[in-house]
Amino acid sequence: MHLAFVTSLVPDGTLTTGYEIANAAIIGGLRRAGVQVSVVGFTWPGKQPIDPENTVVLGSVDVQTHTASAGQRLLWLGRALAEGQTFSSVKLRHTGEARIRQALQTLEPFDGYVLNGVTLAGAYPDLFRNKPSIFVAHNVEHQSAAENAAAARSLVERLLYTREARLLKQLEAKLCKQADFVFTLAEEDRVPLGIADDRRSATLPLTTRATTPAPLFSRQPAYDLALIGTWTWQPNRIGLDWFLEQVVPQLPDHMQIKIAGRAPAGLRSDHPGVEFVGRVEDATAFVRGAKVIPLISQAGSGVQLKTIETFELGMPAVATRSSLRGITDLPENCTVADDPAGFALALTHATRLRLPAGDGRAFHAAQIKAMDRQISRGLAALPKSMQRHAA
């Protein structure tokens, strides 16, 4: 079976965001199942695909809103309003439908599509209907947009996110309806997407790496807490704001809190132990340098890949219930707390206990096994559909 994996950004080997980590895991799972996967999408400026022989590049694009100029943001907004497109999808509309059709023709013969997320499939919603398809819903995007609207800091932001939520809800419904099978990354996402039928959808467990590092049963943590993420992404920012504004003030002044990753300008905390360290060279070493990992999600949908990585590394953690979407078996060294006072108390208690790291290899192996089983279910839905399309 030969499938075209249609995605906004093709893998370039730089696994810095949850989206990129998830994509690598899904492509790896498809190839373990014996599928020939050809990736179709854009590259970041200056980046090259990690697997050029099996990749068709549509062009180069920087889709980051926070780094775009004011003129570029206004151009995207104007086009989105004029064309009735979502703000995220309109960024990929400059290539044109003819160029993408031509790119797909170079892959022939192929059997169907894996539509990876809403963005590129949503930019050209009628382009990928000529063959069977699997739709991968990384998140319930309309739900995330509605949460962003509720957390917006200005009326204009609120109105734009509300518009985005309305369009995304229509788009997700369309993509789910036309797909032969739908994968979500969290069980909780199937109902709001209207695909709770087990014959047409399944939850896809993920991993953050091909193999799990050996456990560090004996280690010397360098600081108390470590958080890492792309904090410019609004759902992540909502969680970080909750942590900094409601949890951190209840932590002891002597607690050392390292926060790594891309952060918005002006982000700060009055707590003397908070340090924003920016990009780190070795994310695994950074995480393993902490006594405890706070898993702080408050919004969004899909799975929290930082949670999966924490459990794969066997790290002690304190997690909100929102951080545990898509996780069925919790490690013993993970404490669940949702209210700020309880979360702060659990962190303080865990750092004092110096909980040891566990062995995450069993968790990783279970995720791989479950992922392979679900991918097989999705692929099994395609041959019947291929017969219908051929007729």
Image (cartoon, rainbow, N blue to C red):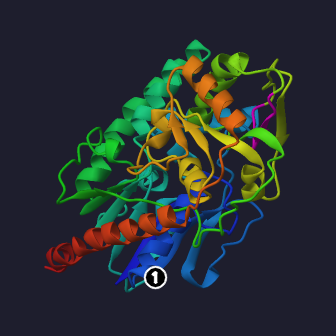
Please name the residue that numbered disc 1 is placed on. 107
- Point out residue 123 in the picture as x, y percentages from the top left corner: 46, 51
Q: For residue 260: magenta?
A: yes
Q: Which of 118 and 364 is in front in this view?
A: 364
Q: Nearer the viewer, residue 149 or 308?
A: 308
- Point out residue 172 in the picture as x, y percentages from the top left corner: 34, 45
How many neighbours does mark 1 have within 10 angstroms: few (below 14), some (14-19), or many (20 or more)?
Answer: some
Label 1 is placed on what type of residue?
Leu
Q: What predominant SS class does the magenta segment belong to?
A: loop
Q: In which quarter of the image is the C terminus?
A: bottom left
**Relative to residue 350, is residue 207 depicted above or below?**
below
Look at 40% across and 38% down and name the residue there.
168
Look at 72% across and 58% down and name the residue there.
284
- Residue lying farthest to the front in this orientation: 353
Q: In which quarter of the image is the N terminus?
A: bottom left
Q: For residue 324: magenta?
A: no
Look at 84% across and 41% down and name the residue there.
277
- Residue lying farthest to the top in this orientation: 155
Region in magenta: 255-264
Q: Report whether 42 appears left or right of 253.
A: left
